[in-house]
Each structure stands twice: as structure tokens, then as C-alpha cells.
Amino acid sequence: MNTLAPDEKLCPYCAETIKAAAVKCRFCQSDLTPEPPVDLSDLAEPDVAPDPEDESQPDEPVLEPEPALDTPPPPAAASRGGVRVLAALLVLCLVLGGALAFVVHRSRHPDLGTAPNGQVTDSSFRNAAMSAASDAAAQALSYSWKTFDADRKKARALMGTKLAKQYDAAMDQVAQQTATSKLTLKATVLSAGLLSAKEHEAKVLLFVNTVTTREGSKKQQLDQNRVVMDLTRKDGAWTVSSMDAF
């Protein structure tokens, strides 16, 4: 027996194979009644009786999945970059601060070319010490009866506390005679020699001529003196700490 194709069927009258859609047999010329369409609902699955055991068991609640916790985002790259920038700025500030401190220290404590015995060899430093001593000697040994108090004040400003007291005592002794005789003393430093020069102190030998004149008289008195002066240096400025004339 031949197997029928899906689009073929047998004629019910002559049993010949014809097309499934044919309404008339091409062999026996018999009219064919169309087959009723198949009701797909009849092919539905039969109802299944519920299992008594299932009815006895209550429906279990359906658990909804727990929402996922929000995980904090990792630190942004911008935040990390900001920390790096702050760290770099801090390092830069430290470097600049150190450089500034070095410059200030160097300005106050320049490289003086100090020898092993502590003596300063820098020529500008040594010249500054001799210049300060010369100015102080000329100011301290010069005064006039017209400007006695002002001259005294200027000289004291160049001296340390101890020497200023000694200077005041000496000036008190000559104040009356200077005013009465109308005297004027003019001191001139001829030369200066450095006996010792260290970073914070110096000793200078000065050769000084002092000319004394009296108001209304052409007569002059010349005194030649040697002065040994000790100076102290602080913050770049020289102060006279002692002065001996002979």
C-alpha cells in the first residue's frame, strides 16, 4: 500500500489517490463532499482532576526577590586627582618655604669665607667693620657747645648699653666747661686697621686727630689719638661695645 502524501487522499468510491482538496474524483467522476473542518477545541487537553493532596496543601507565598542594595560607587577619578593636586601643592609650598628660609638666612648670614681660627676673610665684611668703627669714633669724639645734646644723642645711638652709660658719665664731666668756654671738638679718622674680625664681633685700631676751637678765637688745639674699638654685629648692623683712647 502506497503512503499518502499530506496533500493527497483516497476517493471513497473508487479508492484511487486524488488531491486532498479535490471536490470531484478524476477517475470515477463522483462528487466528493468536503470533509468538515477539524475543531481544534476538540483536540484540547482533557481536564485533569485536581490532586486531593494538592488541595490539602495551602499555596506557598511567592517570595519576591529582595532588591539589590545600592553599592556605593567607587571614588571618582576626579577625587583621586584632587588629592594628588593637593599633595603636589603641599610639597611645592614646603620647597618654596625652605628656599625662602635659606635665602633669608643667607642674607643675614652670608658666606664670609671664615678661616679655621674663626677669622672672617671676606673683604666686604672687613671693610664694613672698619667703616662702622670710623663713623662711630668720629661721632663720639666730636661735639659742639651749640649742639651738645644732639651730638650726644647721635653718639649714644651707635653704642651698646654698657658703653652708653660710660659715655654719658664722661660727657657730664665736660658739659659745663664746653658750654662756658664755647668749645667745639672736631674728630677726623686718618686711618683704621682691623685687629680681629669674626662673624659677630670685630676689633679695630683707629688713628684719630681731634681739633678743639673756642668761639671768638683763632687758636686751635690738635690732639692725636689712637683708639681701640670693639664692635658687636647683630642682624647685619654694627654696635660699639667698648672704646679706649690713648
Image (cartoon, grey):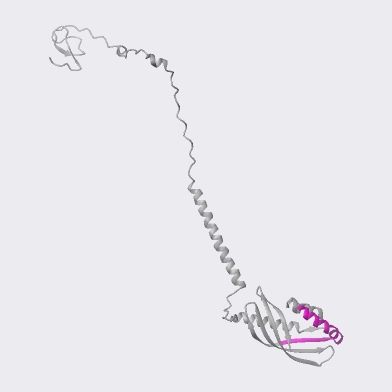
For residue 179, what is the image quadrant? bottom right
Q: Judge by depth and name the residue closer to the eye, 238 or 30.
A: 238
**Would residue 213 be counted in the magenta stretch?**
no
Q: Is residue 168 magenta?
A: yes
- Extreme residue in the right direction: 180
Q: Nearer the viewer, residue 50 or 36?
A: 50
Instruction: Answer with the quarter of the image where residue 111 lies.
Output: bottom right
- Horizontal side, residue 20 vs residue 216: left or right: left
Q: Is residue 223 above or below residue 52?
A: below
Q: Is residue 35 above or below residue 216?
A: above
Residue 1, image x, y percentages: 12, 14
Q: Which residue is at a point 58% across and 69% down the rendered structure image?
A: 103
- For the question of whether residue 147 can be seen, the reply is no
Residue closest to the eye, 232 or 128: 232
Q: Quadrant of the C terminus?
A: bottom right
Question: What span is in magenta?
Answer: 164-188
How far from the left and from the top, in percent, is residue 158?
73, 78
> Would you say residue 138 is visible in this rendering?
yes
193 left or right of 186 in image: left
Q: How many marks?
A: 0
Residue 4 locus on image (x, y percent): 17, 16
Secondary structure that dominates the magenta span? helix
